[in-house]
Amino acid sequence: MELSRYILILLFFSLLCSASACSNGECQLGDKCLSDGDCGAGLYCFDCRLEFSGSKCVRYTVSDPFKVVNNSLPFNKYAYLTTHNAFAIDGEPSHTGVPRITVDNQEDSVTQQLNNGVRALMLDTYDLKGDVWLCHSSGGKCYDYTAFEPLIDTLKEIETFLSANPTEIVTIILEDYVKAPNGLTKVFSKSGLMKYWFPVSKMPKKGEDWPTVSDMVAQNHRLLVFTSMKSKEQSEGIAYQWKYMVENQYGDDGMDKGKCSNRAESPPLNDKTKSLVLVNYFPTVPVKLTSCLQNSMALTDMLNTCYNAAGRRWANFLAVNYYKRSDGGGALEATDLLNGRLLCGCDDVHSCSVSVSSTFSTQRLFFFYKFLLSFCYWN
Ligand SMILES: *[C@@H]1O[C@H](CO)[C@@H](O)[C@H](O)[C@H]1NC(C)=O
């Protein structure tokens, strides 16, 4: 071939590439970007520094299985993204007047978490200043300098979300240190959340299925609350978590590849008299920089490990730190995967709903597009 023809071909492809370089909300998952505005819906521009240089469009939303598929199955047939220490938010101003000296686990407000598809929140509740506070502490005691905010503030955010989203269900999992009599009940009553309360008497006690989501919505039983304090099921009607749920080890010990064993308080993972399965996947000390890696590939491996450990049951709750940090799909994609597995044995919840022919043509178009784009990198 003559040199001029090479030049012509090169010129053709460079034109093609400059035409497909993305911006203004056109960038897809994994495309390079400069700002959030470059990325398409459900994506933002994020720099997972340890894995790639520069920023890429990554996900920040979970697909809603009730909407993508349907809500006619029992509550325990779906997976819910769970934020570990949902209240320990980076940048939350001090509410005690004393600067806070403790770590954070998340980066956006509980309202944003819920709007992005988080459906279960882990909250640590303590007695402080004659009220109940959300706090990071040790030894069961909260201090001014470890407190985040009064529980009521967070519960009000949840109430606002549930009232604005009448087909959604939220689960609260409490690491509970409140000793004040009826301390929690008082705050839940004040928050306006009691009208959504799922009664303990209706919770399956022998591993049966939960009511269907559509029934729960019809009854307005759209708030599930679990406590780590056994006595409160009797005294306040708040479900004792490990009577209904199995859970793996949390922190560093829960991140060993190929291992998934129950935390001390939980029955063994394969105890099928508990209908719900919770998988924790976060290090003991939350580190922002590494969380995008932790929330990515190894997370899916752990879900498979825990599936086998739980007697071939997929997780219903997946709890992580910094839930939006990933190298692409992260915990958001992992939750879509869990819903795909639970609802139709597929790798993604979207495969449970779209017809075969439309998947096929969309996929073909996508591959063609990627094929064209690959010339850009080749160039
Ligand atoms: C809802 O989706 C599930 C999972 O795909 C399916 O088995 C079930 O038949 C669907 N129910 C209705 C009412 O469409």
Image: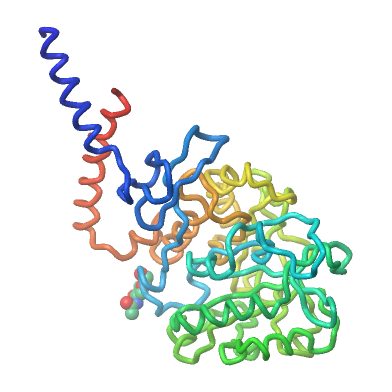
Residue furthest front as drawn: 97
| Residue in the image at 20% along x and 57% along y | 358
Q: Quadrant of ligand 1?
A: bottom left
| Residue in the image at 62% along x and 64% along y | 278
Horizontally, residue 26 falls left or right of residue 324, namely left
Could you say which is closer to the camera, residue 186 or residue 301? 186
x then y, percent, for residue 126: 80, 74
Could you say which is closer to the camera, residue 84 or residue 21? 21
Q: How many marks?
A: 0
Height in image: 289 above or below 228? above
Instruction: Write down the quadrant of residue 347 in the picture.
Output: bottom left
x then y, percent, for residue 228: 76, 74
Instruction: Please indicate, yes or no, whether residue 273 appears anywhere in the rendered image.
Output: no
Horizontally, residue 4 falls left or right of residue 251, namely left
Q: How is the image coloured?
A: rainbow
| Residue in the image at 33% along x and 46% along y | 27
Could you say which is closer to the camera, residue 272 or residue 296? 296
Image quadrant occupied by the C terminus: top left
Image quadrant occupied by the N terminus: top left
x then y, percent, for residue 120: 58, 70
Could you say which is closer to the camera, residue 278 or residue 178? 178
Height in image: 19 above or below 87? above
Horizontally, residue 322 falls left or right of residue 57, namely right
| Residue in the image at 71% along x and 89% along y | 237
x then y, percent, for residue 152: 68, 80
Instruction: Please indicate, yes or no, whether residue 201 appears anywhere in the rendered image.
Output: yes
Horizontally, residue 119 falls left or right of residue 73, namely right
Height in image: 10 above or below 164? above
